[in-house]
Image (cartoon, rainbow, N blue to C red):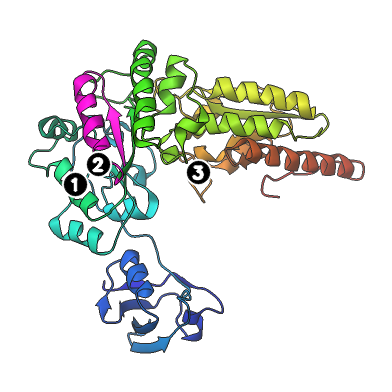
Amino acid sequence: MKGLLIESVVSGSIAAELELTAGDRLLAINGHALRDVIDYSYHAASNDDLLLEVEKQDGEIWELEFERTDGEALGLTFPAPDPARCANNCLFCFVHQLPKGLRKPLYVKDEDYRLSFLNGNYVTLANLKPAALARIIAQRLSPLYISVHATNPLLREKLLGKQGIPPILEQLQQLADNRIVMHTQVVLCPGLNDGAELERTVSDLAGLYPAVQSLAIVPLGLTAHRQKLPQLTAVSADYAREFISKWQPQSEALRRKLRQPFLFLADEFYLKGGCPFPAIREYGDFPQIENGVGMVPLFLKESRQLLRRVRPLGHFRATVVTGCSSYGFVKDFLEKLSAATGAEIVPVAVENKLFGEKVTVSGLVGGNDIVAALAGRELGAALLVPDVMLKEGEGLYLDDVSLEELERRFGCPVVVFDSTPSGFYRALKELRKQCKRLKSRKKVKPALFLSSTQ
């Protein structure tokens, strides 16, 4: 269908005054047909004299002409665009390694430059049409997040499982010439794009600085469900240590040369190799934190700051679940927090049976894995789970287990907390308040159902 479906209208906004409602369609702004929310944002911001073409729910077409002041927002929201499907067949694609029975959207591979701009999703640009590239430049869609993997054209085609793709360096150069900022990544596959090939890739991308602002190297993820897929080598503890010993000094050398942190190694290398993390200054303004780069050093810094200001909460018991890779530093933080607050906080590392034991991050823990890990344990006042384990806004784990189901299974509240030291402390203080209310009410009533949504 043409135009953009209006999802909601902000009360008191310009759109509300124009009597636009959810369910109407915004077709054009100043004569420009709208394909998606990017077109809307671009054309709505381009002028304060606006002419909207709207199709009402009954099919009637309205033309609304008005002048606003100082770029005031129109007050319209729209659904997120449906992502363009990925036509690559990457050797290391995580979607190809998923077990059966997960939520259907998890099996969708997206490759959409719009979502790279809007949400920070990584795209390869291997399927980018000339018209799309021209649009990126014309509408200044910056920054973009780009999966490079290798700048050697033949090796890149092998890694992406697709021939005849545009040379990535030519694409990046064209974007750089038009002042598009880029953040890049390499998914490292031992024996394929490491060694001399990685040196070539890093050198090529550093040569495009400052348009290419950062480069993250992240290890490939291998699940236990790689049937009929190419044989790949996992990053071992020994490999991680050797890799860090070579590339951390080069990262620091590039920082000195470019006068800004540029090359980042994913936290997983340091956790797997048992190596100390770089100084916090080596992460700059954390441009790759959503890519698993700098999360642990930032957590450690914030936990030290938090522990200096926490207050006693009294004694009560609660259980916290985490992924295996984060268990060590989480356990250390919780032991110190327990000593400072008087609360008994018990961390439990959840082995990943959904994807296999090689997958150790908290964000890929399934609900049934939590059930298995906590079988027979006394959880105390509540079970606390980090929000990274759940689909945002839906309260579901990857295997479709809900928070309500966990509460029924364990017979205690399940409390979701923001996955930061401060977020956990806030949840702990709120849980203490609930425990006090429960004690107080028990003096009057024989029982009380305590909900995690209170």
Q: Residues within 10 Å of mark 2 (few under 14, many from 20)?
A: some
Q: Could you say where residue 91 lies in the image, as x and y percent from the top left?
A: 21, 30
Of 182 and 24, nearer the camera is: 182
Inspect the image, locate mark 2, and give the three-letter code of the amino acid beneath it. Leu
Position of residue 117 in the picture relative to residue 365 (left or right): left
Can the viewer see residue 100 in this picture? no
The structure residue drawn at horizontal position 69% and vertical position 27%, both measured from the top left corner, is 379
Query: x, y percentage for residue 167?
Result: 12, 42
How far apart are the alpha carbons under marks 3 and 1? 42 Å
Residue in the picture at 33% in, 69% down? 42
Type of amino acid under label 3: Leu
Q: Residue furthest left?
A: 164
Mark positioned earlier in the residue sequence (1 or 2): 1
Is residue 260 toward the left or the right of residue 156 in the image? right
Residue 173: give its label. 1
Question: What type is the residue that disc 1 sits on?
Answer: Gln
Question: Where is 150 relative to 5, above or below?
Answer: above
As drawn, the label of residue 396 is 3
Which of the 4 image quadrants contains residue 79?
A: bottom left
Give the CA distance from mark 1 to mark 2. 7 Å
The answer to the question of whether label 1 and label 2 lie on touching residues, with beta carbons closer than 8 A, is yes
Residue 352 in view of the camera: yes
Please say whether residue 208 is one of the residues in the magenta stretch: yes
Range covered by the magenta-colored residues: 183-211
Q: Nearer the viewer, mark 3 or mark 1?
A: 1
Residue 172: x and y in percent read: 21, 46
Give whichever of discs 3 and 1 has the lower sequence position. Answer: 1
Residue of label 2: 208
User: Element at badge 3?
Assistant: loop
| CA distance separating discs 3 and 2 | 41 Å
